[in-house]
Image: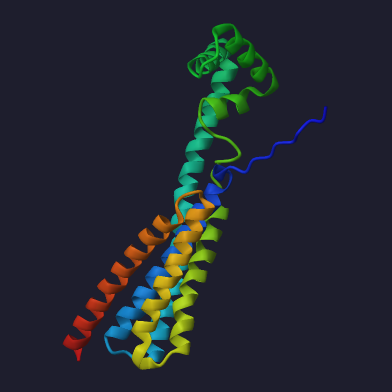
Amino acid sequence: MSRLSHSEIHMVHRIGWLRAAVLGANDGLVSTASLVVGVAAAGSGKPEVLVAGLAGLVAGAMSMAAGEYVSVSSQTDAEQADLARETRELAEMPEAELEELTRIYVDRGLDRDLAEKVATQLTERDALGTHARDELGISETVTARPIQAALVSALTFATGAVVPLIVVLLVPATSIGLWVAVSTIVGLALLGGLGASAGGAGVLWGALRVTLWGALAMAATAAVGALFGVAVG
């Protein structure tokens, strides 16, 4: 009788980098497109729009990287503090830690005898790793990686931000706002659908929610640009 192999790909295995990638690209596209539309609505020429967009790309990418690094580093610090405390507790009161692990397995549905056996065997194999995973919820799958998150955020932000700048280069100066808005809506729909699909969610809803907020952002900056452009002019 042959043994069937069973392989599964779970969304949680890629949620860390997926979240950073989708967030970075979405922010890059929306913020840069909104900036370009606002500057264009103020009556600026193509060179000024390009400079503003390029400055937005660089500033946004650095801001995303710094923010993601600080945020994920804070998570890493918390994880390391928890692991240090758990290491100390395992050394000072192993019986209490074994009982705590046993109760965790009982709460998950195992009977007391089986829970004790599982807790004992896992503790003998890797006490800290077992407590980190089953007590603290820390595992290799979801552990924080600050540098990776920062780089992904910066690169994906820049990738998204390049799209409206390319559009500005290709279209007439008189219709920059329109073309950037249209291309951004299309890009956001594709990005939202792709992110939703990769994360296992509904494609239509993923595309709709991203597109809606992007359209609102561009409408707001266009209104500000038109208002202050007329006032300054």
Q: Position of residue 9 (x, y in %)?
A: 62, 43
Q: Note whether residue 62 is visible.
A: no
Lateral position of residue 183 relative to residue 220, left or right: right
Q: Is residue 52 above or below residue 84?
A: below
Which color mode does the image show?
rainbow
Q: Measuring 34% from the left and 83% from the top, which residue is drawn there?
A: 177
Q: Is residue 183 above or below residue 138?
A: below
Q: Nearer the viewer, residue 81 or 5?
A: 5
Q: Furthest-left residue in view?
A: 231
Q: Residue at x 37, y 61 (%)?
A: 208
**x and y, in percent, of residue 152 in the image:** 55, 59
In the picture as drawn, the residue positioned furthest to the right comes out as 1
In the image, 79 versus 25, the foreground residue is 25
Residue plotted at (55% across, 8% down):
112
> What is the x, y in percent for residue 75?
47, 42
Figure quadrant of residue 12? top right
Q: Residue 54's spot in the image, x, y percent?
A: 45, 79
In this view, 147 is above or below 228:
above
223 sits left or right of 45 in the view:
left
Q: Image quadrant of residue 50?
A: bottom left
Residue furthest out toward the top: 113
Q: What residue appears at the point 48 percent right and 48 percent down from the top-left corner?
A: 72
Quarter containing the N terminus: top right
Q: Is residue 91 above or below residue 26?
A: above
**Quadrant of the image containing the C terminus:** bottom left
Residue 152 seen: yes
**How many labels were placed on the picture?**
0
